[in-house]
Image (cartoon, rainbow, N blue to C red):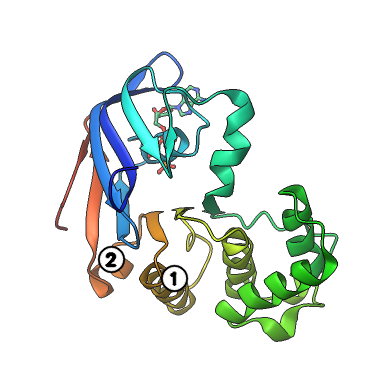
């Protein structure tokens, strides 16, 4: 990693799977930056995120994410890259058959945590950050959409990620709750985690001015205004 840059893509072509979705992508995101990713449906936002979290391979160009060289990334290393990333998607992906506590514990154990006390402390820590410490014993269906999304964000924070990738994290939420979620993500970015958030919600972008990148016509544009 060079300096405080946590994502670097240089002249990257992104294919899905044989069709060139984005050509010659150049992108740099620094530690603690908050960036919106916009673009029409099908223009390549998810494909860009997939390159960053190692779901799609780089065919040409270069990429470094959280210190991992995407070009050299083997299947075996992908889980280690993912531990440096928090991933937050639109449809919450909480396990519906267990409590908030058990959801978080499951994610910690899956990433190698064993000590019960450390697990409990970490869970309380992240729930505190998202303002949901009192909901530890609740089942997902006992929470509102916004609260469920906060738990997903708490889960994304468990391993202290360098970057959070959020794909339409407010897609299922009302405008007020959406704004709260984005404010929470902004606050998280101020403590040093870079946030890249794909969204179609221009209202939110207008209310919270930040750097905007945009996919369209097979390319990625930086510092766009809307
Ligand atoms: N698994 C796949 N196989 C074939 N083509 C795909 C696949 N996934 C995506 N595509 C195509 O790649 C292009 C970019 O898709 P992508 O999902 O990145 O767009 P997007 O900007 O995230 O769209 P949305 O806003 O609808 O989520 C689209 O033309 C899509 O049809």
* Residue plotted at (60% across, 58% down): 159
Residue 96: x percent and y percent?
79, 59
Mark 1 and mark 2 residues within 8 Å of each other at the beta carbon: no
Task: Decide: is 194 above or below 7.
Answer: below
Q: Earlier in the sequence, mark 1 or mark 2?
A: 1
* Residue plotted at (35% across, 31% down): 63
Q: Is residue 198 left or right of residue 93?
A: left
Q: On the rendered image, what quadrant is the C terminus found in? A: bottom left
* Residue plotted at (63% across, 62% down): 158
* Residue plotted at (76% across, 67% down): 119
Mark 2: C-beta under 8 Å from nearest atom of ligand 1: no
Q: On the rendered image, what quadrant is the N terminus found in? A: top left
Q: Is residue 218 visible?
A: no
Mark 2 residue element: helix
Task: Decide: is 198 above or below 55.
Answer: below
Q: Looking at the rendering, which quadrant does residue 203 occupy?
A: bottom left
Extreme residue in the bottom direction: 134
Mark 1 residue element: helix
Q: Quadrant of ligand 1?
A: top left
User: How many numbered discs sit on the rendered protein?
Assistant: 2
Q: Nearer the viewer, mark 1 or mark 2?
A: 1
Residue at image mark 2: 205
Q: Residues within 10 Å of mark 1 (few under 14, many from 20)?
A: many
Residue at image mark 1: 188
Q: Looking at the rendering, which quadrant does residue 178 occupy?
A: bottom left
Residue 68: x percent and y percent?
45, 36
Q: Residues within 10 Å of mark 2 (few under 14, many from 20)?
A: some
Distance of label 1 from label 2 (alpha carbons): 17 Å
Nearest the viewer among 206 and 109 is 109
Q: Return the mark for residue 32.
A: none
Q: Is residue 94 visible?
A: yes
């Amino acid at each position: 990693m060079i300096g405080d840059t946590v994502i670097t893509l240089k002249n990257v072509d992104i294919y899905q799977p044989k069709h060139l979705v984005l050509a010659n992508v150049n992108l740099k995101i620094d530690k603690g930056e908050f960036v919106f990713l916009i673009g029409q449906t099908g223009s390549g936002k998810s494909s860009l995120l997939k390159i960053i979290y190692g779901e799609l391979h780089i065919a040409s160009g270069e990429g470094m994410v959280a210190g991992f060289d995407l070009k050299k990334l083997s299947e075996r290393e992908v889980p280690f890259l993912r531990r440096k990333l928090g991933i937050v998607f639109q449809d919450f992906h909480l396990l519906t058959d267990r409590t908030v506590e058990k959801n978080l514990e499951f994610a910690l154990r899956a990433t190698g945590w064993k000590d019960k006390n450390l697990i409990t402390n970490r869970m309380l820590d992240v729930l505190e950050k998202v303002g949901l410490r009192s909901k530890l014993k609740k089942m997902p269906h006992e929470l509102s959409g916004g609260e469920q999304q906060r738990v997903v964000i708490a889960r994304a924070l468990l391993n202290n990620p360098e970057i959070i990738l959020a794909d339409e994290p407010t897609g299922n939420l009302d405008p007020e709750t959406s704004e709260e979620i984005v404010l929470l993500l902004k606050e998280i970015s101020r403590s040093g985690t870079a946030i890249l958030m794909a969204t179609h919600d221009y209202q939110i972008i207008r209310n919270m001015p930040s750097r905007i990148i945009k996919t369209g016509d097979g390319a990625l544009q930086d510092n766009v205004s809307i």
